[in-house]
Image: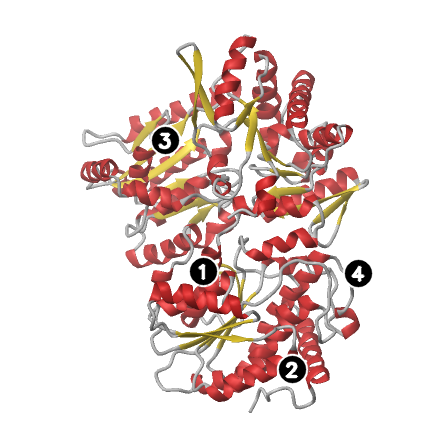
């Protein structure tokens, strides 16, 4: 539920096009919600906050009276129409945005600059800025979307300042951001970068795109990138981040249960019962690699005549920008290729290619996704390709194969389970198709499982029976920790939750017992992770009391916040997030080792909640002394990132290298990234970033972040999946569910890990006493 403060402030979303379609009805206008990736991406906001959407309504309405009636219709749906003169709108959208900016953003060379188009682009951004600034109230959050409005943040900042309004501004780019040579080919690149840098928060879909933007700002403007994902330019600092956009899997799950869709699936299954169907769904755009797709498919047919009569590609190519010359030429080229392939390989029994040059309904699309044995995505560059996720969401129990261009945005997250290829190589593409259509069922299931865990993430149903096993979860009564405790109880484990506050612990027990039944095996024990002596007292008691411990989840922690110290006179981030929990593991290690030696018992698991924020640690960390730890001059993001770095180092170079391996302990220690999750901890951002920036970061998380149940999936996977043992993943860091991640260079430094190990032991002995530590080797 949104906080009272969130409900009071306004949120303004600005995009070139409104997510509404207008049509004339009885002398007025009727507006209906349209579909699209941006609408899907922001669906998480609808239940958490109210907002108003600003943008062009998509139709030319020159008459002022009709504009007024159209505006009234849009207003009823929470939208503000920004009306543009037709010629100006054309020059802005089809001209500069899509004939110049779009190709450059997608790594296309040889783009001709047009001064008239540039003037139109500037003018439209000014019109948007005037409208939004006049409507905004002091304190409103303004969130700008995509490449059509790169100048808008700076223009808004100027107008808001002149009106005495303070509004945080965010920006999300839903396309790639190219490497330097491509971007610098644009004569006005500096003006565009300055426009975006006026934001407080700037979001991209992948680390690569974020890095390219940051480097462009450094090289072209002389801006300074800080260690904690911020860019300083002149007197303003912008936070730069990666926000992954996904789909709503439940929407597709519901569609697959619809009688109309079920009937259509049955019809298609019958029609293609002797065929291997491959589906492709793209806008007709050169960035989607449709020409390369058809050329690669043609080579596949040529090289595999025995499969030419068995395989059929159903390609949906949705018309796009049909009044742009380059797109007209592309359509002609594709139509020629379609005719050539069908003319060469068609037989009386059928054709190998069905080309649909129109939009298809959502039920029809769902049915096509479902019956296809493979989905072919050949993007040369894109933002976050949602077709990949949509296909996987429709393939449960069918185990379809995703054939994915390695240059697609989705490849950063879904490459592990896909058959990947370089879209410029027709030979690679043909081989990838062959691999997909000849793949055995076992490999299909394995690959699909990895893909499904990204799209829908790990589910409680996939956790193995935990009856008879004992789990302890620090931070187990709130947020992600609560969801982990709940999942363990519902799957038969006895759970010990450890939290600081009694009311939180009792509330968690009541909720879990309400769901699991009054006999659920769960208890709460109080402990402050910022007090080492209390940790020793509590966990030494648990060690003596319990006869076994199978699962130890270290989920307690504080988020990005202002510097402060604990009662132990230690940086509270370092002690609560790392040192205290490291001490918990030390106190319970004899119990874990005892459990590991029990006949027929799976190896115990120790799972720490780390984060991709470990990359935001200071560029140079030594872990050499207390003075380095207790340094209030370190930035809020850096001090938090340092604790997450410590977790990865402590697991890999501490527990695994210095305890588990030398003693040949049958215990697995892992660290995980939960994803960007909406928890109560995110509210701490308002303290970490005083003022409006903290508000904007919190609101952005409401839109694109995972919920707390989804945030628990990484830890649940690490704690329970048989794959951990099967693949020998001890000491690994998981950047997502079932995805071992590549940690930062500092997190891969064994010398830094050794320094942290030594410092941790020194600090505990100093604060608790020489006998404070349990002998790891006893």
What residue is disc 3 on?
Answer: 316
Between 420 and 506, which is closer to the camera in this rendering?
506
* 1 or 4: tag closer to the N-terminus: 4
Between 265 and 126, which is closer to the camera in this rendering?
126
Q: How many marks?
A: 4
Vertical position of residue 187 compared to residue 62: above or below: below
Whether the residues at callouts 4 and 2 have beta carbons within 8 Å, the answer is no
* 3 or 1: tag closer to the N-terminus: 3
What residue is disc 4 on?
Answer: 633
Judged from the image, the secondary structure of the residue bearing numbered disc 1 is helix
Is residue 122 found left or right of 709 in the rendered image?
right
Judged from the image, the secondary structure of the residue bearing numbered disc 2 is helix
Judged from the image, the secondary structure of the residue bearing numbered disc 3 is strand
Q: Disc 1 to disc 4, how far (Cα)?
A: 35 Å
* 2 or 3: tag closer to the N-terminus: 3
Label 2 neighbour load within 10 Å: few <14, some 14-19, many 20+ = some
Instruction: Give the mark toward the camera: 2 or 3.
Output: 2
The disc label shown at residue 713, or none = 1
Judged from the image, the secondary structure of the residue bearing numbered disc 4 is loop
Spot occupied by residue 107 in the image (x, y as percentages of width and height): 59, 35
Rendered-image quadrant of the C terminus: bottom right
**Residue 19 in sight here:** yes
Instruction: Give the mark toward the camera: 3 or 1.
Output: 1
Residue at x 62% of width, y 39% of height: 9
What residue is disc 2 on?
Answer: 533
């Amino acid at each position: 539920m949104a906080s009272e403060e969130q409900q009071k402030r306004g949120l303004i979303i600005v995009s070139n096009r409104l997510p509404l379609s207008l049509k004339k009805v009885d002398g007025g206008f009727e507006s209906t919600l349209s579909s699209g990736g941006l609408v899907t991406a922001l669906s998480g906001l609808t239940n958490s906050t109210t907002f108003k959407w600003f943008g062009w309504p998509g139709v030319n309405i020159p008459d002022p009276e009709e504009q007024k009636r159209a505006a009234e219709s849009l207003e009823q749906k929470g939208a503000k129409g920004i009306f543009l003169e037709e010629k100006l709108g054309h020059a802005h959208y089809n001209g500069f945005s899509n004939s110049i900016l779009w190709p450059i953003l997608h790594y296309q060379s040889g783009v001709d600059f047009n001064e008239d188009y540039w003037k139109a682009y500037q003018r439209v951004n000014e019109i948007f800025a005037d409208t939004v600034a006049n409507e905004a109230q002091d304190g409103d959050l303004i969130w700008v979307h995509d490449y059509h409005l790169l100048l808008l943040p700076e223009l808004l900042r100027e107008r808001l300042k002149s009106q005495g309004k303070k509004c945080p501004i965010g920006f999300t780019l839903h396309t790639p951001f190219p490497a330097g040579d491509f971007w610098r080919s644009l004569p006005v690149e500096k003006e565009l970068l300055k426009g975006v840098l006026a934001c407080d928060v700037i979001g991209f879909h992948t680390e690569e795109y974020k890095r390219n933007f940051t480097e462009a700002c450094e090289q072209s403007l002389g801006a300074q990138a800080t260690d904690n994902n911020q860019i300083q330019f002149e007197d303003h600092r912008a936070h730069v981040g990666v926000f992954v956009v996904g789909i709503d899997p439940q929407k597709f799950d519901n569609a697959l249960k619809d009688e109309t869709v079920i009937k259509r699936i049955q019809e298609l299954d019958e029609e293609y019962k002797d065929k291997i169907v491959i589906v492709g769904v793209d806008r007709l755009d050169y960035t989607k690699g449709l020409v390369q797709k058809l050329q690669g498919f043609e080579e596949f047919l040529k090289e595999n005549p025995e499969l030419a009569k068995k395989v059929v590609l159903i390609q949906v190519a949705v018309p796009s920008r049909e009044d742009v010359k380059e797109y007209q030429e592309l359509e002609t080229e594709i139509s020629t290729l379609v005719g050539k392939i069908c003319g060469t390989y068609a037989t009386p029994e059928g054709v190998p290619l069905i080309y649909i040059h129109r939009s298809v309904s959502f039920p029809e699309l769902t049915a096509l996704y479902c019956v296809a044995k493979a989905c072919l995505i050949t993007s040369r560059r894109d933002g976050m390709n949602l077709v990949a996720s949509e296909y996987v969401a429709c393939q449960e129990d069918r185990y379809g194969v995703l054939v994915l261009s390695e240059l697609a945005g989705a490849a950063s997250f879904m490459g592990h389970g896909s058959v990947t290829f370089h879209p410029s190589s027709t030979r690679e593409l043909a081989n990838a198709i062959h691999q997909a259509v000849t793949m055995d069922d076992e490999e299909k299931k394995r690959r699909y499982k990895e893909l499904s865990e990204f799209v829908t993430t790990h589910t409680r149903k996939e956790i193995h029976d935990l009856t008879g096993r004992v789990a302890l979860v620090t931070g187990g009564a709130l947020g992600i920790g609560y969801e982990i405790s709940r999942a363990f109880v519902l799957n038969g484990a006895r759970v010990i939750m450890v939290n600081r506050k009694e009311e939180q612990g009792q509330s968690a027990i009541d909720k879990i017992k309400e769901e699991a039944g009054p006999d659920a095996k769960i208890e709460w024990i109080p402990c402050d992770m910022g007090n080492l002596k209390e940790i020793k007292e509590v966990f030494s008691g648990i060690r003596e009391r319990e006869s076994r411990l199978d699962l130890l989840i270290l989920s307690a922690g504080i988020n990005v916040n202002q510097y402060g110290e604990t009662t132990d006179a230690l940086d509270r981030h370092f002690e609560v997030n790392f040192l205290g929990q490291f001490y918990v593991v030390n106190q319970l290690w004899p119990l874990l080792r005892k459990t590991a030696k029990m006949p027929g018992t799976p190896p115990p698991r120790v799972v720490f909640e780390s984060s991709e924020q470990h990359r935001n640690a200071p560029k140079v960390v030594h872990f050499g002394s207390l003075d380095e730890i207790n340094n209030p001059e370190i930035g809020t993001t850096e001090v938090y990132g340092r604790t997450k770095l410590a977790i990865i180092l402590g697991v890999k170079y501490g527990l695994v290298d210095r305890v588990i391996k030398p003693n040949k302990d049958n215990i697995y220690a892992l660290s995980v990234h939960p994803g960007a999750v909406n928890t109560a901890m995110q509210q701490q951002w308002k303290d970490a970033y005083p003022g409006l920036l903290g508000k904007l970061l919190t609101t952005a998380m409401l839109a694109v972040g995972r919920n707390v149940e989804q945030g628990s999936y990484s830890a649940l996977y690490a704690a329970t999946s048989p794959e951990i043992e099967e693949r020998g993943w001890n000491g690994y860091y998981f950047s997502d569910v079932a995805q071992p991640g590549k940690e930062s260079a500092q997190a891969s430094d064994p010398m830094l890990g050794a320094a942290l190990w030594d410092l941790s032991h020194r600090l505990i002995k100093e604060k608790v006493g020489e006998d404070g530590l349990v002998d790891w080797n006893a």
